[in-house]
Image (spheres, rainbow, N blue to C red):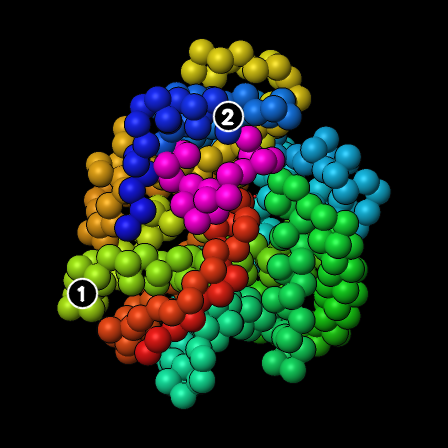
Amino acid sequence: MTLSEPFSPMAQQALAAAFDLRNLPADFYENPFPYYAALRRYAPIKLLPDGSYLFSRYDDVKYLYTHAELFSSDKKLEFAPKFGDSLLFEHHTSSLVFTDPPRHAAIRPIIMTAFTSRALVAMEPMLEQMVARLLDALEVQSGPDLIEHFAGVIPVEVIAHLLGVPVAEREPLRRWSLAILSALEPVISPAVFEAGNVAVQEMLDYLARLIAQRRKQPGDPDQDMLTRLIQAQALEAVGLSERELLHNCILLMNAGHETTTNFVANGLVALHDWPEQRALLVNQPELIRSACEELLRFESSNQLGSRVTTQAVTVAGVDIPAATQLVLGIGAANRDPAVFEQPDYLDIQRKPNRHLAFGYGPHQCAGMNLGRMEGRVAMGQFVQRFPEFGLGKRVRAQRARFRSWSQLALVL
Ligand code: HEM
C-alpha cells in the first residue's frame, strides 16, 4: 500500500522546497506519491532549479492540456540542446504528439484512421487467444517474469499485428521502442543517446521497406492499419511527407509499447498489493472496465507530461514567461484529493473517475481504446487464471517519466 502523506507538514514543506526533477531522492522511484502530495500542498506550481515549472494539481494540469494555443507540444526548443542535430531530434520533433495546431489538427485525423473501432473489434479474438497462450506458457515457465513473459509481450504483438509486421520480424521492436523512449527521461547518458539514435535509424530503414512492400501489395484496409495510413496519406489534402509518415509509424509502434506494458504490470502489482480489491475482481469479472480506469489513475504509466509556453501566461496566480518548459504531473494530478476521494486507496469501483492517464484535450491519447482493450483482456484473464498469484523479487526501473519495472518475478 502506498500512502502519500507519511510526512509531517514541516517535512512536506522541506521536501517541496528542495524538490528537483533532475536530482531525485533515491526513494522517489519506488514511491513518488509522498513527494507529489508535498508539492501539491506547498508548491503546486514549483519552479525547478533549471527554470522549468512542475505542476501537480489536477485542475492546473487539465488546464495546460486543454489550451494548446498557450502551451505548445513542439519540442524543438527543448530537444535542440539535448539531442543536437541527430535522428532522435528529427524523430521527436516530427511526430503527431509533438506537433502544434493547426498542423496537429490536420494530421491527427489521418493517424486516427489507424484506430477504427471496426479494426479494434476485429482484433479482440486474436488478442484473447494470444493472452491465453501466454498464460499457458507462464504455467510451465521456470522463473516467470511478469514483464518479460507477459506484460512486455502483448503490446508488441498487438501493434505488430495491426501494422502487419511479419512474426519473424518482430524481435527488435521492443528493444527499439525502449531505446527511443528512454531518451525522453529528464537526464540521459551518452550511451542512452547513442542507442536511441541507432534505434531510430533501424526503425526508419525497417519501416521504409515495410511501407514499400505494402504499396506494392496493399492489405485489406478494414484490417490493415498500415494500408489505411498509406491510403489516407495519398487522399488527404494536407498530405504527409514520406519522412513524416515513417516517424508517425514509429510513434504508433512506440507510444503503445511502454505505456501498455506498464499499465498491465503496474495494474497487476497494485491488485496483488490490495488483496481485497483483487478478490472483488476475481468474484465479479464484470468489474474489469472500472478496475482498468482505477488502475490507470492509481499507477499512471506516464507520470509526467510536458509543454512549453507560447507566450507569457499567468496560471493560478503564477506569472510564467514565454518559452518556459512546463512539466505536467499526471501521476500527481491523479492523486489529487480535491478531485478524487481517498486518492491513495485503490477502489476498482470508483465512479466518477476522470483521471488524466491518457492526457486530455487535443492531444489526448490516440490509442486509448486500444490500450484499454489490451489492459482489460490481459488483466481480466490473468486474475481469473491465477487468482492467488504472488510476486517475488521486484525492482523498480529508475525512471521518473514512465513508471515501470526492471524485474517482476511471478510466483504462480
Ligand atoms: C495504457 C496505455 C497508454 C497510456 C497510459 C497512454 C498515454 C498517453 C498520453 C498521456 C498521451 C498524451 C501526450 C501529450 O498530450 O503530450 C498519449 C498520446 C498518444 N498516444 Fe497513448 N497511451 C497509451 C496507449 C497507447 C497506444 C496503445 C497507442 C497506439 C498504438 C497510443 C498512441 C498515442 C498517440 C499516437 C498519441 C499522440 C496523440 C496526439 O498527439 O494527438 N497510446 N498517450
**Picture quadrant where residue 330 is located:** top left
Mark 1 burial class by Cα count in 10 Å: few <14, some 14-19, many 20+: some
Residue type marked 1: Ala
Residue lying at 45% horizontally and 80% vertically, measured from the top left: 143
* Residue ranking furthest to the right: 85
Kindly identify which residue carries mark 1.
Answer: 279
Magenta span has 176?
no
Q: Is residue 82 visible to the viewer in this orientation of the structure?
A: yes
Residue lying at 17% horizontally and 59% vertically, measured from the top left: 276
Residue type marked 2: Ala
Q: How many marks?
A: 2
Measured as percent of width and height from the top left, residue 53 is found at 55, 25
Residue lying at 47% horizontally and 60% vertically, measured from the top left: 395
Quadrant where the image shows the C terminus: bottom left
Tag 1 secondary structure: helix
Sequence order check, earlier mark of 1 and 2: 2
Q: Is residue 189 left or right of residue 378?
A: right
**Picture quadrant where residue 42 is located:** top left
Span of residues in magenta: 20-36
Would the CB of label 1 be found within 8 Å of ligand 1? no
Above or below for 112 versus 203: above
Above or below for 83 versus 218: above
Q: Is residue 239 visible to the viewer in this orientation of the structure?
A: no
